[in-house]
Image (cartoon, rainbow, N blue to C red):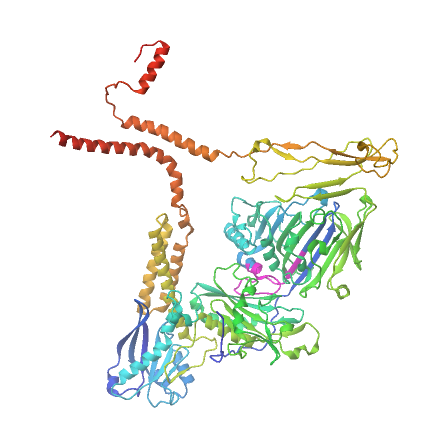
Amino acid sequence: MVPVTVVFTRESVPLDDQEKLPFTVVHEREIPLKYKMKIKCRFQKAYRRALDHEEEALSSGSMQEAEAMLDEPQEQAEGSLTMYVISEHSSLLPQDMMSYIGPKRTAVVRGIMHREAFNIIGRRIVQVAQAMSLTEDVLAAALADHLPEDKWSAEKRRPLKSSLGYEITFSLLNPDPKSHDVHWDIEGAVRRYVQPFLNALSAAGNFSVDSQILYYAVLGVNPRFDSASSSYYLDMHNLPHVINPVESRLGSSAASLYPVLNFLLYVPELAHSPLYIQDKDGAPVATNAFHSPRWGGIMVYNVDSKTYNASVLPVRVEVDMVRVMEVFLAQLRLLFGIAQPQVPPKCLLSGPKSEGLMTWELDRLLWARSVENLATATTTLTSLAQLLGKISNIVIKDDVASEVYRAVAAVQKSAEELASGHLASAFVASQEAVTSSELAFFDPSLLHLLYFPDDQKFAIYIPLFLPMAVPILLSLVKIFLETRKSWKKPQKTD
Amino acid sequence: MAAAIPLSLLVLLLLGPGGWCLAEHPRDSLREELVITPLPSGDVAATFQFRTRWDSELQREGVSHYRLFPKALGQLISKYSLRELHLSFTQGFWRTRYWGPPFLQAPSGAELWVWFQDTVTDVDKSWKELSNVLSGIFCASLNFIDSTNTVTPTASFKPLGLANDTDHYFLRYAVLPREVVCTENLTPWKKLLPCSSKAGLSVLLKADRLFHTSYHSQAVHIRPVCRNARCTSISWELRQTLSVVFDAFITGQGKKDWSLFRMFSRTLTEPCPLASESRVYVDITNYNQDNETLEVHPSPTTTYQDVILGTRKTYAIYDLLDSAMINNSRNLNIQLKWKRPPENGYIHYQPAQDRLQPHLLEMLIQLPANSVTKVSIQFERALLKWTEYTPDPNHGFYVSPSVLSALVPSMVAAKPVDWEESPLFNSLFPVSDGSNYFVRLYTEPLLVNLPTPDFSMPYNVICLTCTVVAVCYGSFYNLLTRTFHIEEPRTGGLAKRLANLIRRARGVPLL
């Protein structure tokens, strides 16, 4: 459930409609995912009149001032939205735009002086609210592992699986240290660019950042020479083969349990400079980078040919961290699945904040993660139950049983919190559900009596019981024959 | 799946506060060295050492930046609060009697000993997790380390680096003698090196030659050291050492001439650009026994003399970073040649390979007069598979007899004879001159009685069990469930007639 607060200013709707304020309207929508599975999305809109400071803020000249004045009073709860309805002729928005979505959880919609004002405005509000919260593609991407493969899910790129934390590693690959002496100010770049972004994302998990420099690490693919531009290029079809040879040297996750995201910066060797990545049309990619879902990204940094003029090898190369971090942060957003929302027509999207993450984008991520966690937890518990049904040999200890109970309780709590709109507690409960269900399913004590196949049981017990059973069977046969004889005898004599 | 991203969509405003400042990151340096030591028995020992020194106090926050120091080990130090770590994998045993004292010895198998920092609360839990993580990094079965093979020595394993106090509660030591060292332990060890077997001394580390040796030991040592003479700050030192001993007979086919190519099947081409020092030391202290002198080629330009392990030794230095050394020849192949007076002894030995070839030992010896010479050789018979046993395994196994061929000086000088004219018993063996004659003697074959497995046990067990069960249980059951009733004796029957025959013969009344 998404709680939306709609604030009406004085001239946005006709007067008699304004008399009706405040009241609440609930709008429900069902999103079908697959056969028999649907997700119900409820928007609870609380309409009210604008307070004085809000009127003042919304009549100021530009959007930035309005936002600055609206910011101070409250900090909204996670998952909720606030929409301001301004008058039709207000100059706050450009003339042809009907709505505006701000960086924090606010939006502005143009009002209308019409008899059916509330209905029309209600529809516009729902459109904007949907863009800022759950939509089909977000849900489909989050549940990509659980839905069957069809053309819907095959097109979507899979975001990272939900986990308690992530480890991010930046690696500089220098395959030719004789020619290039590469230096990068990674500490400052992490502090200035990456850390604020991760601080904004901290509700979604724990993050740790590392960096390393690897020498003599080559890409597994030989680039081809393009004589037209006298440069080397990597074809789009070669890109999947690049990652595997490098992966063994990255030394990922030696000491941590969280999944690792690798971001590699590759400085091509002197013999293969400059190196470009070509997309499927044969044009070089503007950023010279590519990313692989659920793994990380690689960027190729070409050394400026002017630095070779001194012709003393190795040349000193200072990496331009701004360019590099732009690419890496954009790749990080894509890896997490924070993509561009589908904005309704005539809607203005505000520019990004300096951390690179808008607050309602974080909310979308948390919703998607909660749904994914719930799906994973229920799938795990269902598999455990099915396994117990098939193999009766498994022994469930007490602590495993208590983990299962905890997981079920957490799933129920998370579903309740989602329905009532408390996003933060729902997310925490869903994480707890996943952890408990995985602890129960992967407990090593489940496997103790598992490998005891049936034919071995026969081979052990038959030499013992067969000699015993033969006299018993023979006497049973004799008894049966005698009883039959004694039935027949009375009949005969009578 | 990979996809290129069009970055025309949102580009973040990256306005960082402040201007450009080149961060002062901790410096690290790499030194590599190889010491080649000819051993008194004709073998050659090679010891590699790669030392990375990292000038930083290891931060425990979430961000750490690595350059030459490998990230996997740095993360270990910060996560488990290590003060020192020593891990070694060894195959074989260093024979101090024949080879002299070693630089660094390690026990056969895997050995791990660790000093933790004082801030660690649960040392045993950290020790268990650390051994599991190390077993993943080095592809070894170190996860078998648990409380049954871990001890806390109180006197012998003091910290080798800087230490304020030594409370033995923070020390743990474990040895796994069963651990076998092989290529899959060498590969992750090589990956930790900055130049990673592409340049410098690490190109010599080829697994197929390094394991064809009689002693192979690789180790990782991490400890804190002083950064300067006054010891105002601490650096972390990582030493990776590898010692191998090439056997003259197995690798060298009996000849005592060694070169880098013979030993490692590679030569040195270029130095590692990341190393601040890259040298090869060859021990040229002359061995004066047996009047043998050692010649090293190419001739060294500099030498180093010092008292090492109690004796004064001289080393020839080959510096890879010295451009004159590499520019003269494309590659550096150090050769050791022993110059000796004409041989008075020759030994040819070919070791056995299971199911392929037997041992072969040939010796050319000069026996002193009026003496007794004893030659003994130890060998083992490999365990056979059950299909390889002969039908009469209890007879034993034969060892072929030894052959003794000798030119015996004769008392009386014989005249050379004409081949066709002399009798046949005189012309068996060709003789070049009359002063000695050729004789070939054989020893008795050896019959060795080895324990044989009992091939009939499974069948025995089944038969015995079934018989016992059938007989015991069957009769018991019959006693319990049969009812007895009187039956009129029947006349006739073959059994009665046979019984009567026997009774008539005995003179006993008939039935």
Q: How many marks?
A: 0
Q: The N terminus of chain A is located in which quarter?
A: bottom left
- Residue A272 percent across, percent down from the top left: 62, 73
Question: Observer-nearest residue: A379 or A466?
Answer: A466
Q: Answer above or below: position of B408 versus B3.
A: above
Residue A78 lies in what quarter of the image?
bottom left
Give residue B164's position: percent from left, percent from top: 61, 53
Q: Is residue B23 above or below residue A18?
A: above
Taking the spot 32% from the left edge, 80% from the top edge, the residue there is A125
- Residue in the foreground of this view, choosing between A70 and B373: B373
Residue at point 64%, 65% (across, down): B27
- In which quadrant will I find the C terminus of chain A? top left
x then y, percent, for residue B232: 65, 61
| Residue A203 appears left or right of A242 | left
The magenta span reads B49-75
Above/below status of B419 relative to B280: above
Is residue B63 in the magenta section? Answer: yes
